[in-house]
Amino acid sequence: GSFSVKSGFNGENAPRSVIPNITGSIKDSSNTILSENSYYIGSEAIVNSSNLSLAYPLESPGRLDMDQMEDIWSYILYKELKVLPEEHNIFHIEPVYSNIQSRMKIAEIMFESFNIFNIHIEPHGPLSLWSTAKSTA
């Protein structure tokens, strides 16, 4: 669903990381409590929500805020999974209603910002079928 972002490694039975799909930036720059970070992602954004302007990068199926998603992907790769993206292939599962422009932007960000070697983008519908050993529904 669009509430969380799940990530992990191929061959594992469950995701290594599941974070809420939410970002937060400080409302008031003079707030000294949150001064060490100006931007929060996932659970950190929820915990500090009273001091933050919250946003949801995946607002509706097929609509991604790419700048916020880039921040989330960076957080996942470097802080949650603790990997160097250029050493891994990326398999990205997208919403069914995603368009070609969205796919191209995802690939552009992954190649240019994270220097990945390879990316495969697939809609989640067929993957759900294949996970149950079915090819049609």
Image (cartoon, rainbow, N blue to C red):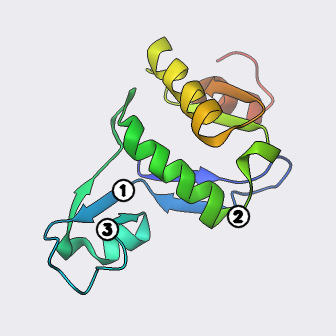
Name the quadrant containing residue 69: top left
Which of the numbered marks, if any, corresponds to residue 38? 3
Q: Amino acid at mark 1?
A: Ile
Image position of 5 with respect to 91: above or below: below
Compare marks 1 and 3 and give the one earlier in the sequence: 1
The residue that disc 1 covers is 22
Q: Amino acid at mark 3?
A: Ser
Q: 118 or 14: which is nearer to us?
A: 118
The answer to whether residue 116 shows anywhere in this view is yes
The answer to whether residue 1 shows anywhere in this view is no
Q: In the structure shown, which secondary structural element does the residue marked by tag 1 occupy? A: loop
Label 1–label 3 contact, CB within 8 A: no
Compare marks 3 and 2 and give the one earlier in the sequence: 3
Q: Amino acid at mark 2?
A: Lys
Name the quadrant containing residue 136: top right
Compare marks 2 and 1 and give the one earlier in the sequence: 1
The residue that disc 2 covers is 82
Q: 54 or 109: which is nearer to us?
A: 109
Label 3–label 2 contact, CB within 8 A: no
The quadrant of the rendering that contains the C terminus is: top right
Which of labels 2 and 1 is toward the front?
Answer: 2
Q: In the structure shown, which secondary structural element does the residue marked by tag 3 occupy? A: loop
